[in-house]
Amino acid sequence: MINVLEYNGYQATIEFDPDDEIFFGHLAGINDIIGFHGTTVNELKTAFHESVDDYIETCKKIGKSPQKPYSGKVMFRIDPQVHAKAALAAQLKGISLNQWAEDVLREAAGH
């Protein structure tokens, strides 16, 4: 089971270190490495919120745009026969291939 926190459009994966007896996490979906920790769930959530807020503020100070997790644009190559079957499935449902693919990916991702 993967534990995830969400705040201000960012998500983080959470783990527990039994040796140090702390919860720790890292922002997911961005290249910048942002981590945080806490000894209780409340401390962890507070540290997560502070880390996101600090990240955004630091980016402003240095003139960098903070990375947002994923743009929503996906480009990948698939077998032409799969492409044709997907396009047909979308057409038969009366929706665009983009909408069909989003629906299928959402279902596969468990949302």
Image (tube, rainbow, N blue to C red):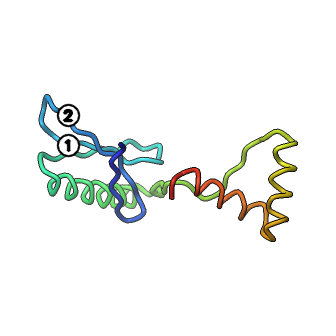
Under circle 2, the secondary element is: strand
* Residue 16 position (above or below residue 41): above
Is 105 in front, or is 10?
Answer: 105
* Residue 38 at x, y percent in the picture: 16, 47
* Residue 109 at x, y percent in the picture: 54, 51
Is 69 in front, or is 94?
Answer: 94
| Label number found at residue 17 | 2
What residue lies at 12% left-to-right and 36% top-to-bottom?
21
What residue lies at 27% left-to-right and 60% top-to-bottom?
49
How many neighbours does mark 1 have within 10 angstroms: few (below 14), some (14-19), or many (20 or more)? some
Residue furthest to the top in view is 19
Q: Are marks 2 and 1 in contact (CB under 8 Å)?
A: yes
Is 99 in front, or is 55?
Answer: 99
What residue lies at 58% left-to-right and 57% top-to-bottom?
106
Image quarter of the N terminus: top left
Earlier in the chain: of badge 2 and badge 1, it is 2
Name the kind of residue labelled 1 in the image.
Phe
Q: Is 17 positioned to the left or the right of 56 in the image? A: left
Residue furthest to the bottom in view is 94
The quarter of the displayed image where residue 92 is located: bottom right
Under circle 1, the secondary element is: strand
* Residue 81 at x, y percent in the picture: 87, 42
The quarter of the displayed image where residue 57 is located: bottom left
* Residue 108 position (above or below residue 81): below
How many neighbours does mark 2 have within 10 angstroms: few (below 14), some (14-19), or many (20 or more)? few
* Residue 17 at x, y percent in the picture: 20, 34
Q: Is 73 positioned to the left or the right of 85 in the image? A: left
What residue lies at 20% left-to-right and 43% top-to-bottom?
23
Count of picture labels: 2
Name the kind of residue labelled 2 in the image.
Asp
Q: Is 82 positioned to the left or the right of 29 in the image? A: right
Residue that numbered label 1 is attached to: 23
